[in-house]
Image (cartoon, rainbow, N blue to C red):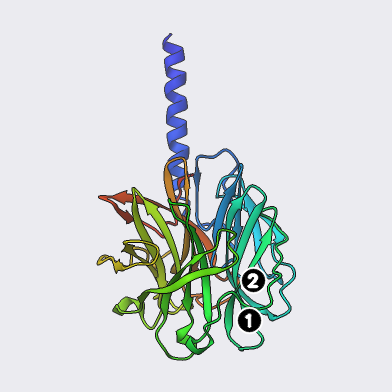
Amino acid sequence: MTGRRLRRRGAVALAAALLVAGCDSGPTPSSTPEGARVFTNPVVATDAPDPQAIRVGDTWYLFHTNAGGRNVPVLTSPDLVEWTPAGDALPELPDWADAGKTWAPEVIQLAPDRFVLYYTVADRASGRQCLGRAVASTPLGPYADDSAGPLVCQADLGGSIDASPFRDTDGSLWLLWKNDGNAIGVDTWLWSQRLSPDGLRLTGPAAKLLKQTEPWEGTLIEGPFLHRHDGKLFLFFAANAYDKDTYAEGYAVCEGPAGPCVKAPENPILAGNDVASGPGHASMVEKDGRTWLIYHAWPPGQEGTTDPGRQVWLDEIVWTDGKPTLKGPTGSAQPRP
């Protein structure tokens, strides 16, 4: 009996020592052996800006801004940590669009065999960045855009970028985006408008939600997405110049998808530190009762580069007194999702 207890105590001590050793490993790309209970950021160590992920069955699918010659790169993962490249979700652009600036794609599943991709692309007619939509029967695609022109294109406001779909608890579909005002020196607003049930058309009036007003935001806000938690509707957004260490993430609380919205006084809730610079343009997922923020960030001192570029980071959001709080960017080992 005594020998069994000693062996059990020894196994516990060894497990604790291994965990401590993992926590001291520092900010290295995620290469944790399969089955380990911890991971380290970044979870994608190559250039993968503006990440968004959805879960279909037991697989996660992550989409991001064009890189490596792909319009909409897509990666797959069983656990949000280990990601494998899976091709180009949008290999062909519509006739009205030019290649090279296909940004910030986001996907929503509307039926078992219906997925809609919203993306930013160069509109040839206006010369501005505008929003398109494409449809596929599987999350990997290929997605096809059969439209004759952009879904949203506010050319007189600098263009339209950063589309984000949202299904509310009443089943209604909404699209958020940003007018690209900083491209022409005017205000950047976050917008919201209701979508048709098939996700292909905008209906009703567009609503202005927020614009840049706070010192930490600089001259712009962007990258909006909505998330409900305990009945309360949160609007998350990034702000400041994407290629600077001042880029950061904040949030507002909204009465509904069309607003009004009030910014949180504690913003920004995610800002750069000694392991990651300019974190932002996030999306959010839930897994086993925990909430995770997926976002991009630069290695400190390498802002604006493409190698390694904006890597993908994963940090847990903790809801404290009904508010989202983050300790990240986290470069040390932490429990897996």
- As drawn, the label of residue 45 is none
Farthest residue, direction top = 1
Asked whether residue 76 appears in the rendered view, the answer is yes
Distance in Å between CA atoms under marks 2 and 1? 12 Å
Q: Give the vertical position of 126 relative to 306 (above or below).
A: below
Front residue (pair 330, 292): 292
At label 1, the amino acid type is Ala
Who's the residue at 70% across and 81% down the image? 96
- In the rendered image, which quarter is residue 307 located in? bottom right
Who's the residue at 46% across and 14% down the image? 4
**Residue 227 x/y as whole percent:** 41, 56
- In the rendered image, which quarter is residue 252 located in? bottom left
Give the labeled residue for mark 2: 66
Who's the residue at 58% across and 79% down the image? 130
Q: Give the vertical position of 142 relative to 10 (above or below).
A: below
Give the labeled residue for mark 1: 122
Q: Quadrant of the N terminus?
A: top left
Comparing marks 2 and 1, which lies closer to the viewer? 1
Tag 2–tag 1 contact (CB < 8 Å): no
**Residue 207 x/y as whole percent:** 40, 73
Front residue (pair 330, 219): 219
Q: Is residue 336 left or right of residue 62?
A: left
**Residue 248 x/y as whole percent:** 39, 70
Please report whichever mark, 2 or 1, sits nearer to the chain's N-terminal start.
2
Q: Counting other residues with Cα less than 10 Å from the Cα at mark 1, is it few (<14), some (14-19), or many (20 or more)?
A: many
Front residue (pair 203, 126): 203
Numbered disc 2: secondary structure? loop
At label 2, the amino acid type is Asn
Q: Counting other residues with Cα less than 10 Å from the Cα at mark 2, is it few (<14), some (14-19), or many (20 or more)?
A: many
Numbered disc 1: secondary structure? strand
Number of numbered callouts drawn: 2
